[in-house]
Image: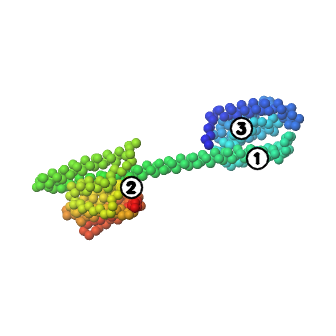
Amino acid sequence: MRVTRLPLPLLPLLVAVVQVVGSTGAQWNQVHSAGLMRVPLDAVGYALLLTGPLALAVRHRNPVVSLAVTQVATWAYVVLGYSYGPVFASPAIALYCAVSAGHRRAAWLTGGLMYAFLLSYATWAANLPIPSWYHNLAVAAFIGVVLAAGEYTRARRERIAERRRVEAEESRRQASEERLTMAQELHDVLAHNISLIHVQASTALHLIDDHPEQARTALTTIKQASKDVLTEMRSVINVLREGAPRSPTAGLDRLDELTGRAEHGGLTIERQVEGRVRALPPGTDRAGYRIVQEALTNAARHAPGSTVTVLLRYGPRELLIRVTDTGGVGAAEPLGGGNGIPGMRERATALGGTLTSGPHGRGFRVEARLPIPEEPA
């Protein structure tokens, strides 16, 4: 249920018209009734009828003040003997607004005082033409309905605010995860290609005087690697643009291209595929590609000239990725404290898998196990 809130000046004006016109009409019967004997409206009576609506103008800025003023004006109006009627509209609205705004203690206390006042007045001062128990029950029901409506509105507003807060928090979390994914993608792209360029540049510098043709091959590899890194960076950055598809930038279907670049970088690659190759979820496909890429990058940096075996084993519920090198035959870069292996482990862990790495014989091995959907029968 959607409640349309009236503009601040409009509701007090509407309530003022209803109270003044309605009370003026009601007094013709009540003033001349032998049972009620209410007094006719005068300047004080009309002033009290306008005081309550006037206090409603501050019901949103200060609902407790609005509540107190409307109650006092209504009680004074009743005690002075003016006719019954729509005078109770303004205290009821103020009571509802106070509860819905969260001032529950003040509202419920005022509601209790209001009931006690009307009960006492009806018992000892008023001459009502209806049974007292009926009057008391009706007053209690009226106040209870107003308070219940205010409580419902307050609870609904809190639920909406909480839902919006959770949605905003989820949006920030997703944005943070996307930034982390982009950082991992950029790291993997740059680390692999820049490392390849570095290795080939070192080779070219070493061979350029004595073996210029081999140096030419190294420079050709550098040219291709620089082109590849620009292409992959453009692919990664494109997903940050509004409306761009959020699809993986690379997958295991590009493994031939990846191993081909590594071979140009001086590694000897042996590929092994076991099990039935099948389509993988996008996240797993991308993670598998990046794990192999990072492992080959580490081999090119720390074990140049080695033979690297890349094994993909498709099991019923698990994809095994194992990259093993035989150790370098040239001058290797010292092993640093980069983000390569931690980044691979984070990718595997995020998918519910595992990744281990460490020395293997004279070389090094990286082994990842990623969960995959069960192969259909």
Colour mode? Answer: rainbow
Return the disc, 3 or 1, that comes first in the chain's sequence: 3
- Residue 44: % across, % down: 78, 32
Residue at x 24% of width, y 59% of height: 300
Q: How crowded is mark 1: few (under 14 residues within 10 Å), some or many (20 or more)?
A: some
> Which residue does the numbered mark 2 point to in the structure image?
281
**Could you tell me the amino acid type at mark 3?**
Ser
**Could you tell me the amino acid type at mark 1?**
Ala
Return the disc, 2 or 3, that comes first in the chain's sequence: 3
Vertical arrangement, residue 17 with respect to residue 177, above or below? above
Q: Residues within 10 Å of mark 2 (few under 14, many from 20)?
A: few
Q: In screen coordinates, is 6 left or right of 131?
A: left
Foreground mark, 1 or 2, reads: 2
- Residue 376: % across, % down: 40, 60
Q: Which labelled disc corresponds to residue 314?
A: none
Foreground mark, 3 or 1, reads: 1
Mark 1 residue element: helix
Q: In screen coordinates, is 91 left or right of 6?
A: right
**Alpha carbon separation for disc pair 1 and 2:** 63 Å
> Which residue does the numbered mark 3 point to in the structure image?
90
**Quadrant for the N terminus in the image:** top right
> Which residue does the numbered mark 1 point to in the structure image?
140
**Could you tell me the amino acid type at mark 2?**
Pro
Vertical arrangement, residue 253 with respect to residue 150, above or below? below
- Residue 137: % across, % down: 79, 47
**Quadrant for the C terminus in the image:** bottom left
Name the residue furthest left.
210
Q: Examine the rendering and report whether any part of residue 368 can be seen.
A: no
**Alpha carbon separation for disc pair 3 and 1:** 17 Å
Q: In screen coordinates, is 289 left or right of 270?
A: right
